[in-house]
Image: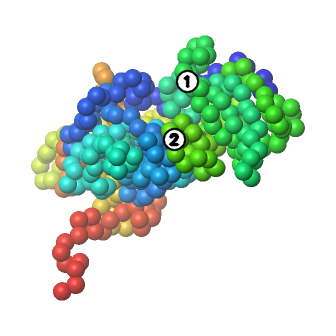
Amino acid sequence: MHSCQTLTFTLNAAFCLSLLLLTTTTAVADEPFRPEPGKFPPADKAKSYTGELTFVDHANRRGSLRTRGKAAFYEQAATPFAMLPYGMVRYQGAPADLRDIPLGTILHGRFYLPPEPELSSVPTLRSGGGFGGFQVHFAENHAALLEDEPSFCLREGLAWKLQEVVRKLEHNTDLWLVTARREPKGEQADKNKPETMSVDAATRIWRGRESLLLQDLIDEGVWPADGKKTFDDQPVLLGLRWKPTFGTRFSQKDGVFNRWHISDIWLDEESIQRAAMQQTEEHKTLIRTRWMPAQVDKVEYGKAGQATVIATLVGGMDESLYADFTKGIQGQMSPVETNLKHGIGNIGQHHTAIQGTILDVRRLDGELPAGSSGVQIRVKVGMVLEGFRAGRMIRIRPMSWPESPVPREEYIEGIEERFPSPDIFKK
């Protein structure tokens, strides 16, 4: 398919910090694990789930994921999830936020039990299925990592190897069925079970700097207008979602109701690298205007309210953001909630944030836990705030980052907004 036979995909090293411990799908916990509040959890204790993103509340860092079960996919009730405060999101091979991911996208996640069930922003559930096992939910609904299909494949060193495509014309449908295997790039085929997925005229094709329509590939003769065409294990990256299609309702575990739809096809390395570069810039702007999340490790109290705050920056960001934190510069930090909302109103990010000097920046040695960047900073502040306590979350910025206003949905005006009192009920 247009000089892609020797295709190799690479993952930018700047994105690998703190993802290294989440690199193998085999390193998944056998038993549910509840992280200790205020501490990064062991990466090998996470459980993996895959499903369709059906709902997003980006301001509160939560949503819903519909996973496959015994019933037809559309009958499955989605499981609510929340991002852990150090939880990472990746989209098209780059750092991202929940707001960047379109509804319907198939996501892979690494999950833990809620650290504090009584404070969870989503319902706490038991794993298993209701209605005879047809409704599947998972109790580990707090995510340390969410990523779309191309991000998952890049991180795991996988590619989809195309075998054949067949034009499907029935029941007023106009689509093609693609048979492919997801396998390590260097291994021979026939290792994994092939999967059949659908493609239609809305599928986006990316090649180098080109954005193509399916009709463009048909005109070039590399995609069949009718009939069947084989691709001899052509490696590509795919973006996946789910679309309703015509089929028999029952016995559809591997049938049309549980079949993924291909939203995007990246034909070569340049095309996915350009997508990742664009998404990286989008995320860098977001972090510089909302500030870098960090978890407080320790507070060394001084005299008259002074203190030295030691904190570890959250992982999954572009390396250039971490590079902005250097010894000797001035910075500001503000306490935030577990959903990373600034907690002191619409001026909290500017007027009530505390300015201080970064005394030291160091890289932690050894195996990093999930969610940690391994970048630890020491900041000397003239006045310590209540939120600057070990285990609490803060947001911090170098003074070189912009002073941008925070949208109303991304801050709270006090504890009553986070945990309403009985006063909200009329007497």
Identity of the residue drawn at 19% across and 78% down: 423
252 horizontally vs 123: left or right: right
Q: How far from the left and from the top, in percent, is residue 383?
A: 21, 54
Q: 278 above or below 375?
A: below
129 horizontally vs 118: left or right: right
260 and 4: which is toward the camera: 260
Q: Quadrant of residue 39?
A: top left
323 horizontally vs 308: left or right: right
Classify mark 2: helix, strand or loop: loop
The answer to whether residue 60 is seen in the rendering is yes
Q: Amino acid at mark 2?
A: Ser
Q: How far from the left and from the top, in percent, is residue 385?
A: 21, 55
Residue 193's mark? 1
Q: Quadrant of residue 46?
A: top left
347 horizontally vs 170: left or right: left
Q: CA distance from mark 1 to mark 2?
A: 19 Å
The answer to whether residue 296 is seen in the rendering is no
